């Protein structure tokens, strides 16, 4: 049964996009299956990158949603349904994690007994880095995030139905410890799924680095959806340029945060110049990976920084949407740059299965996201702040 709707019902154009996304997803899944049969190792490597990209958006939607419940403001109220729908795709991402969970030995050295038997460090880390513990930890991560998503979206839906002002306090009170839980889960997910690809390497900043990238990916995605909704009824008269100016400032902050963590990790490791640490960057500064690193510096930081620092770009919905699309695309490139070099030290950085996977998972994710978004009013109709926001609009 569909959840309660109001006059802020989603536009019919969303249904058409859902159909297109589903078609793209099914084609991508079919091509991914062909790639798995043709080259199993490459399939798993490509799948990991595509999965982490979409999982980061899901996690980022949850994080920004909790941030909004803590701080309030019109910026979050108008995209709360977008963030909620993005976070509610978590069940799909749990199911889509199965290929990685079933093929750990294709990706991780510590999942191969013959490697562990001849590596003293892997033997030392074996109580933590082993297939059984990996699966159990992911189950725990999924359960903790699932509880947060379930309670936050359930109480938000109840607020729509009843208008109970006490629900706003419950949402805020859960979001405070929820952000702490999310930070721990996201950090350990990054350690398990990403950093352990090179189990001899470690970085104390890697977890918080991944947390920042989830927020950036989710904010860029939310801007794209908001720009689409702002051009159509019923929200065409609600969204104003000042709201997108706020979104532009938030994305600018996340871009700066990504650059700060990236440079901080590089400076700390490079200045230490320890063999077990510096090799991570040495592998990523060879061949095609060096070009990709330069592209990230220009297209993921320099260009968005120059554009978002101006009022013109943040005041134009169309320009901001294009910047968000660029940032989102570069998020995928960044995950590719992080996760692929352990298998291809020189390159080439791209493989056709990479595109098939990101399209397959992404098509299914977007179709599911739109389905969830269309089940509810596009605005939280009984939120105490809504009348004030609409009055300003």
Image (spheres, grey):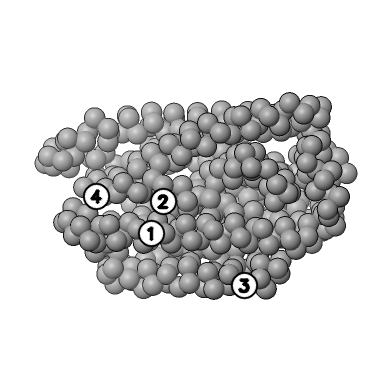
Find disc 1 in the rendering and name its residue. 262
Check disc 2 and report its element: helix, strand or loop: helix
CA gap, disc 4 and disc 2: 16 Å
> Would you say residue 121 is visible in this rendering?
yes
Q: Residue at x 74, y 32 (%)?
A: 157
Against 392, is 321 above or below? below
Of pointers 4 and 2, the one earlier in the residue sequence: 4
- Observer-side mark, 4 or 2, equals 2
* Residue placed furthest toward the right: 7
Res 65 label: none
In this figure, which residue is indicated by the disc labeled 2?
209
Mark 1 vs mark 3, foreground winner is: 3
Residue at image point 84% right, 43% down: 387
Residue 27 visible in this rendered orientation of the protein: no
Q: Compared to 22, does 192 lie above or below?
A: above
Distance Cα–Cα, label 4 vs label 3: 39 Å
Pointer 4 residue: 201
Residues at discs 4 and 1 in contact (Cβ within 8 Å)? no
């Amino acid at each position: 049964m569909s959840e309660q709707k109001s006059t802020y019902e989603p536009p019919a154009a969303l249904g058409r996009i859902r159909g297109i996304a589903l078609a793209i997803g099914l084609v991508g899944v079919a091509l991914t299956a062909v790639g798995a049969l043709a080259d199993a190792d490459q399939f798993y490597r490509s799948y990991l990158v595509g999965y982490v990209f979409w999982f980061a958006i899901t996690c980022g939607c949850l994080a920004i949603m909790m941030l909004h419940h803590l701080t309030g403001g019109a910026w979050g109220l108008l995209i709360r349904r977008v963030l909620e729908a993005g976070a509610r795709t978590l069940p799909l991402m749990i199911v889509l994690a199965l290929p990685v969970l079933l093929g750990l030995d294709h990706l991780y050295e510590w999942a191969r007994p013959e490697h562990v038997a001849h590596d003293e460090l892997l033997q030392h880390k074996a109580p933590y880095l082993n297939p059984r513990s990996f699966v159990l930890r992911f189950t725990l991560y999924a359960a903790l995030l699932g509880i947060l998503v379930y309670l936050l979206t359930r109480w938000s839906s109840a607020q729509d139905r009843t208008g109970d002002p006490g629900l706003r306090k419950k949402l805020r009170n859960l979001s405070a410890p929820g952000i702490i839980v999310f930070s721990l889960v996201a950090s350990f997910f990054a350690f398990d799924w990403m950093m352990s690809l090179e189990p001899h390497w470690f970085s104390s900043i890697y977890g918080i680095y991944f947390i920042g990238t989830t927020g950036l990916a989710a904010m860029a995605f939310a801007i794209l959806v908001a720009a689409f909704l702002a051009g159509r009824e019923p929200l065409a008269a609600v969204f104003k340029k000042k709201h997108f100016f706020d979104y532009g400032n938030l994305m600018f902050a996340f871009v700066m945060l990504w650059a700060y963590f990236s440079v901080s990790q590089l400076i700390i490791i490079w200045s230490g110049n320890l063999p077990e640490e510096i090799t991570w960057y040495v592998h990523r500064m060879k061949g095609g990976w060096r070009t990709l690193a330069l592209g990230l510096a220009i297209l993921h930081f320099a260009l968005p920084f120059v554009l978002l620092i101006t009022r013109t770009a943040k005041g134009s919905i169309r320009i901001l949407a294009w910047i968000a699309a660029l940032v989102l695309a570069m998020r995928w490139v960044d995950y590719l740059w992080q996760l692929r070099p352990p298998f291809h030290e020189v390159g080439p950085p791209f493989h056709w299965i990479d595109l098939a996977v990101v399209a397959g998972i992404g098509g299914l994710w977007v179709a599911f996201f739109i389905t969830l978004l269309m089940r509810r009013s596009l605005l939280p109709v009984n939120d105490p702040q809504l009348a004030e926001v609409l009055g300003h609009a």
